[in-house]
Amino acid sequence: MVSSIELNRGSPTIGSSSNNGEKPEDSKPDNGGGEYNFVPADKSEHDLVLFEVGDPTNPFNYSSPRKWFIFTMIALNTWWLICGSTVFVPATETIQEEFGTSSIVMKIPIATYLIGYSIGPVFLISLSEDYGRKLVAIPSLFLCYVFFIPQALSHNVETIAVCRFLSGFFGSPMLNFVAGVPDLWRGETAGLWAVNIWAFSCEALMLGSIIGAYVLDNLGWRWTFWIQIIVGAPLALIYAIFVPETRGSVILINRTKKIRKKENPNAWTIYEGDKKDLKAFLREVVFRPVAMLFTEPIIFFFSLYDGMNYGLIYLLIESMPLVFAQFGIEAPNNSLLYLSILIGNLIAVPCYYFQLKAQDYYTKKHGAYTPEMKLMWGFIAAVCFPLSLYWYAFTGRPGYNYWLPLVGVGIFGFASHILFIFVSDYTIESYASLASSAVTGQSFCREIIAGICALITHLFYTNVDYKVASAILGAIATVSMLIPPVFYFYGPRIRAASRYSLELKRLAEEDLKREEWISERSARLTREHHQNMAAGRVSYDNQHPNNTTQYKT
């Protein structure tokens, strides 16, 4: 997820930085009387290429309809890829009978898809930050859907399991392209709502099970794979054709290369040196997320909380057909029961308005903003989370109307959406410049836990009484109720004790200096240009050579 702080990052426009605040090694932190300047000694400020004020190629300056179109295409592709993890679920029993294998073996392909999700971002998301969203997304989406073909044609579980891992691996960049939100919005309310909606698209995975159930009933199990290509390929094609590159640093690098080739061989941009070598890649993308996951209390406990939430969605998808079969509700109509989770998610979406209002109120009241304010609506979710599971446990049996356990499942959907938002929001706010590493570790943990849950659910519910199984989950969720209040009251102290606290402070200070320098420079050059225009010394077709915003693309 992305918070208000993160929304100010990610695109290299005035007031943001794409390299997490780390200035180039050859930059000069001080210029003369303490003035910050990162222009290398062998470069000229006048050859520096940045977005000019109001530049229409700057994604921050896109019109609102265009931003929402881009975001919608990202959200739709994300939603369908996540549905890919559940479209297959209703077909597992049929495939099990045809292949003559066990039920636990047939759960492995569900888990491998999620494991692919967990590993893919570690490598592919970093590439998208260095080389562009589209350059990574388009070939990844192509390979993702290509590997659905052998799944549809397979005659053994092994082929399905391996190919689903590869589909999950290559589909994972799009799942994590919520990073496209800070490419488009700095921190406006619209951007925050976009994140809220994106979270809903991730949670709507149960729609995949509904689609899969009816496809299985009418066309057979192989079409649960073909349908993923039939729907996903056009969505990917629309994205490839109509969605522009939104990574600001990549736009400027491409512009600079064109300028050097056609107009000014000395043109340069600060983002050309940001690409990581192998050593930096391994340190920042592989080792640091793992280290942070196991050494930072915030990341560790919130990763477990997030993983439990996500895993329980898969537990419900697997357990609900078993529980509601007691009420005489069979496939494919039992898949419609998943809509109760979705309704709960939908009810939670507008509640974000009250979280934002409470956040603003306490910021004004205390005169300062802290990341812990992101946890306020988490208190409600923390109570509803175990309550929903107990409700589901004790009403999901004959003698009660089947609407009663559905209410419990709906309450779970409500709590799940809130939890999904505040867990990632708080992590990002707490680690700011290192948020990418923090979220990578968190995502890895979440998908692994979800994969484990997908493997054990059927075994768990068939070997333990349904009521007892759900009550055990409720007991675990009850213990987790402590996480939001503990971090709300003790979060500042925990963050201050972090081994990364000094580094975060240094990066934040450097980021602020860089933002101020870029903003002041842009305003100064704009004033000079307007003065020259007014004096008749330059025209729009022949701009002043000292104004680096002259270059056209």
Image (spheres, rainbow, N blue to C red):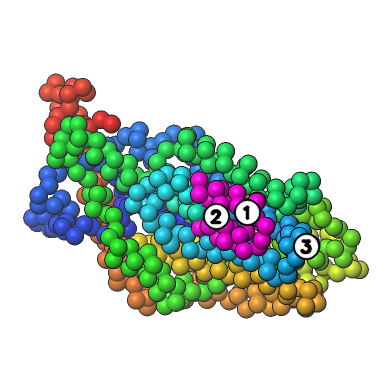
Which residue is at a point 29% across and 40% down the rendered structure image? 254
Element at label 1: helix
- Residues rendered magenta in the picture: 142-169
Q: Position of residue 511 (x, y in %)?
A: 28, 57
Mark 3 residue type: Glu
Give 184 or 253, whichever is nearer the viewer. Answer: 253
Q: Residue 167 carries which label?
A: 2
Dividing the image into 4 quarters, which one contains the C terminus? top left
Which residue is at a point 34% across and 66% down the rendered structure image? 282
Q: Which residue lies under the disc numbered 1?
A: 151
Element at label 2: helix
Mark 2 residue type: Ser
Q: Which residue lies under the disc numbered 3?
A: 97
Mark 1 residue type: Gln
Instruction: Give the Cα distance between marks 2 and 3.
Output: 24 Å
Let me know if residue 504 appears in the view.
Answer: yes
Q: Position of residue 519 (x, y in %)?
A: 25, 45
